[in-house]
Image (spheres, helix red, strand yellow):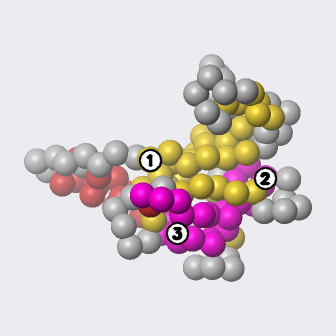
Amino acid sequence: MNGTVIEITPASHQPYDDTVKSDHVLALKGTYHRFGLAAIPRGKSGRKVFQGPLVPGPWAFAFGLSSVIAANPEHGTYGDIRRNKAAGLEHEVEAGDLIRFDGVTYRIEVERRQYINLVAVEGSK
């Protein structure tokens, strides 16, 4: 999909911290890896590493979603994927794809073990 920008809409601001989360899911093409999205908006700050320094926003991160095996497949991960695709919330991505989340454009980089890193594109902050 390289070249197109996927628009990700924030779902909510969390009342207990400065994180903006989304209902959208990024699925890494050719794998079973799926990721949720969250961001620290401009003017706020958060920790990128446990007990690390506060890093001012804007910046975003992806977090791994676990798979659920259920007796009825509709109640597990398969059902989640089917419902997300129907609602336009599941996006198949690969390295180099661009997403726009909370007003900033990020490039997807695939790290070791198929985790993804969101890198802000120059000039989009």
Q: Amino acid at mark 1?
A: Gly
Disc marking residue 64: 1
Q: Nearer the viewer, residue 7 or 29?
A: 29
**Residue highlighted by disc 3:** 93
Residue 59 percent location from the top left of the image: 73, 45
Say if 111 sits above or below 2 in the image: above
Decide: few, some or many residues near mark 1? Use Cα within 10 Å; few <14, some 14-19, many ≥20.
some
> Sequence-wise, which precedes: disc 2 or disc 3?
3
Disc marking residue 80: none
Say if 89 sits above or below 97 in the image: above
Where residue 79 sits, quadrant-wise, is bottom left
Q: Secondary structure at mark 1?
A: strand
Q: Residue at x 48, y 59 (%)?
A: 112
Q: Amino acid at mark 3?
A: Val
Judged left or right of residue 24, residue 33 is left
Q: Residue at x 50, y 45 (%)?
A: 63
Judged left or right of residue 73, residue 61 is right
Q: Nearer the viewer, residue 98 or 109?
A: 109
Nearer to us of marks 1 and 2 is: 1
**Residue highlighted by disc 2:** 103
> Sequence-wise, which precedes: disc 1 or disc 2?
1
The reply to whether callout 3 and callout 1 are in contact (CB within 8 Å) is no
For the N terminus, which image quadrant?
Answer: bottom right
What predominant SS class does the magenta segment belong to?
Answer: strand
Which range of residues does the magenta coloring cover? 89-113
Check if residue 112 falls in the magenta segment: yes
**Gap in Å between the C-alphas at discs 2 and 3?**
19 Å
> Sequence-wise, which precedes: disc 3 or disc 1?
1
Check if residue 120 falls in the magenta segment: no
Judged left or right of residue 19, residue 92 is left
Q: Secondary structure at mark 3?
A: strand
